[in-house]
Structures are given as C-alpha cells and as structure tokens.
Image: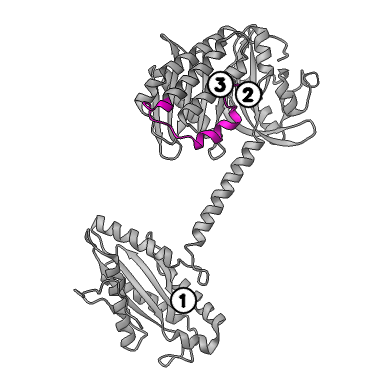
Amino acid sequence: MRCAGSAKKIKNANRPQHRGPGSYQSLGNIEQMAVANRVPEINDLRWCQSLLDAITCVQQQLQAGSRHSESINCILGKSLELTGSQAGMLANISGGEPCRLTDVVPASRSREDALAAFDEIARSALQCGRHVIVRDPEAGNTVALPLSIGSVVYGVLVLSMTARWQDDMIESMAPFTGTAAAVLRQFQEDLSAPQVDAVFDHLADGILTADNDGRIESMNAAAEQMFGYSLDELVGKSVRVLLPEPYASRHDENLAHYRETGEIRIMGYGRELDGQRKDGVIFPMDISVSQIEIQGRDVFVVIARDITEHKAQQQMVELERANTQTLELLVRIDAVTGIANRRHFDEALTNEVRRAARDQKPVSLILCDIDFFKAFNDRYGHPAGDKALGAVAKTIEGCFQRAGEVAARYGGEEFGVVVPGADLAAAAELAATVHERVCALSIPHSASPISDHLTISIGVASAVPGPQFDQTQLVEEADRALYRAKGKGRNCIQLAEPGAKSKPLQRVRR
C-alpha cells in the first residue's frame, strides 16, 4: 500500500481472498461446502482425522515465507470446513477490541446484521475470557472462540452453523485454536511498515486513508481497481468524489459535524452505501471506518468492499423465497373463487381442533351449499356459474375476519368455514349473517323451485375436543345438519343435534 506515512495500528482490516493453490479450500468455495457438510461426532475417526488435517494446515502457516493473507484465509477456511459452519469471522485483537480480518456470510443472510452479531459475541468472549455460545432459531447456533496462548488472547474465531455446538466439540478443538493463536501472534509481530504495505496491497478489499478534512492520503491496489482511479489522481481530493448523491452530501454533513463536536457518526463496520467509479458507474459497497493515530495526528481508515455480487445473490435468494411463498399460497387458494381451497381447509381444521383440545375451548364448523346449483349452471351457463360461485365465496369470507377463521371452497358448490373459539350458539349467529348476506346478493335464479334468486342451505356443528377427538366427527355432524336443512326445503339453517352419533368416515350423500 502506498501512503504518505506508515500506520502504527489499523483496526477492522477486512477479508483477504486466497488466489493461489494451497492445501485448503478457498473462501469462495467454503460457503457451498459448509452447507453440504455434516459435523461428525467428536469421537468419530473422521472428526479426528479432519482435526489433525486442519491443525497441520494451519501449522504450515508458521513457516517462513507464508503470506499473511493466505494464513488468515487458511484459519477461517479450515474452521468452516472442520465444523460444517455456514458463516464465520476471524478477528485479531487491537487495543482490547476484536478487529475483523476476514469473514464469510452466505447470501441468504443480511451481511450487516450478521457482522453486528459476530462483533457482539466476539466482545462477549473477550470480556468473559472463554467461549460463548448464542443459540438463535433463525440465524443458527453461533460460538465465539478466543484464540489464546496462556493468558494472552491474540484473536477471536466466530463460527455459525445450524447444528448445536457441544462443549466437548469445542474442547476437542483446543489444539487447533492454539495453533491459530500462534499464527496470529506471528502475524502481529511481523507487521513492520513495509510488510503492512505488502499485506494491504494483496487484500481483496479496498483500503484508503483520509485526513480530518476528508482528503485522501493513500489507497491500496484493490481500492484503485474498485474505483477506477490511480492514487495520483486522488491524493489531496475529498472522499466525496467516490460517493454519489445523497451520500456525498451526507459525507460533508458528517465532516462538518465532526469538526464542530468531535463526534464521528460513521465509525464501525458493516455499513452499506453506494460508491461511484471514475466512469460514473454506481455500485453497492460495505464500508468500515476507523480512526487511528499516525505520527501524532488522527487519520481515518476506510475499508470498502464491492458487494455487487453479494447483493445479486441476496436478491436471487429473496426472489426464490418470494416465489416459494407465492407457490405455497397458490396451492392453498381455489382458482375459481379466490378463497382458501380444500387443502387449506383441512390443514386449518386440523390445527384448530388440536388447539381447541389443548386449550379446552370450542371449535365450530359451518358448511354451506348453494341450492339447486346444477340447475343454475344449466340455465345460465358455466361462466355465469363460476361468477356466482366467486360472489358467494367472497361474501362468506367477508363474514369471517378474526384470527384463525378460515372460509374455504369445500368442493363443487359447497363451502366450509372453521370458526375457532365459537360455541354452537355463536356459530349459529354467524351462520345467520352468512345466510342473510348471500340472499342480499340477489343473484337471479329462475331455475330454482323455491326462490327467484340464489339461496344457500347451512349446517352448523360445534365441539370441545378431547384428547382422542376425531375431527371427522365434527365434519360429519355439520354435514348431517346440512342434509337436514336440505330436507326441510333448503334456504335455511340447521344445527347439529346434541349428542348425535357420527358414522365414522362416511359422509352423507345428496
């Protein structure tokens, strides 16, 4: 890295990327490999062999001539491979704080949220002086392992995976973490000014320094490539030339605020904003900002990563998730009426019966059937029949908006409604509302022998399920009540008879 002065200490040095061949997987492949990996039992021969291989690989980084960027990649890469973790971070210790060297975050997770969580758990491990485990049902199980030799901690390794971390697994990794600590110790001892420049110029992330007025003083090769400028073109110019609006104006506001108050608003890492290349192309980037002291004056260090590819992968994951949710919704929606279908109805009934049995509360079922619908189709045609089905369906659905209530097309011209928490009397009142509103549609039905407009018959049943309750009982009682409504001339409501005996698995045929 070419700069006006040499830095004594730089926090939050970001991820190097392994480019050449080696005995370990490059970080670009780790994410896919870790997802497929299963963590073996610690007393399993495969685990022992994997642990030995990992230790051997990391030990090789202690040899003279090892490149620091490869050593950093090796530690995290082997850690992910060994444990089957999907995400992770390696940090060294500077000023008692964890300073990120490299990380892997899959596209399915928010990078900003993941790094913030990793930073928090790393700090917790440093404070208590031992490993810390955080279990999260969404983000997985994350462990922070201090990398120490004796009482001196040289770094923190953070790993996240879906499997549960076990104390015996962590204890068995002690030889590996000790070897990794030795590599980090050597890394810190070797960082003379020329070596700092060499390391930074081989980092995949762009690094630049600026003075208190926001004027650029230095940048590494990755930053030149990222923004399309040479160092000579940018030295002495404001950082705002690398930012599009509104970020350029915000930079000026933050700089003015710093001059007035001494407060820095953008310290830390994992912040996303847009960058602008020399050719005007705008791209998303993740930045880290630190303040260091060089020869008695404060200097800002900005570490930038082009996350265009990460964003594209994240958008692809989100699109696939949205498509999956849409498909799941479609398979539960009736194509003709637009309300829930039989599959959704069956799932809702099962869930509500189980909940009612657990809470010892009632659950009711309302079955509705359009009267003389075959004659309607014969008279007006199937397109008009589908339109009438849709109107009736939406009217029924509109009567049930409370949580857990599901109105569905049960089959043909029949509709079913699951009503949790309602006893027979309450369900009867709701059924009366349905009957009234459907009649109010006044859909002409000249082929009906009982009315000049479309009508419905309704059967209602309710129960407080016990542990062995069979939900088919509730369906058959409601079905039997509906059959009685049709027997009484249709266009009416009938309630299930108290103490009625159901015939298992046999629905009434009409």
How many numbered marks does the figure carry? 3
Q: Residues within 10 Å of mark 3 (few under 14, many from 20)?
A: many
Marking on residue 74: 3
Pick whichever of labels 2 and 1 is earlier in the sequence.
2
Q: Is residue 226 above or below residue 332?
A: above
- Viewer-side residue, 108 vs 94: 108
Residue 3 percent across, percent down from the top left = 72, 13
Specify the amino acid type for callout 2.
His
Specify the amino acid type for callout 1.
Val
How far apart in space, not on screen, are marks 1 and 3 (Cα)?
65 Å
Q: Badge 2 is on which residue?
A: 18
The residue that appears at 61% across and 31% down in the rendered structure is 28
Residue 74 percent across, percent down from the top left = 56, 21
Q: In this view, does 206 lie above or below 328?
A: above
Residue 52 percent across, percent down from the top left = 46, 19
Q: Quadrant of residue 316?
A: top right
How far apart in space, not on screen, are marks 2 and 1 (Cα)?
64 Å
Marking on residue 392: 1
Q: Would you say 470 lies left or right of 96 here? A: left
- Viewer-side residue, 255 vs 10: 10
Marks 2/1 in contact by CB < 8 Å: the verdict is no
- Viewer-side residue, 260 vs 329: 329
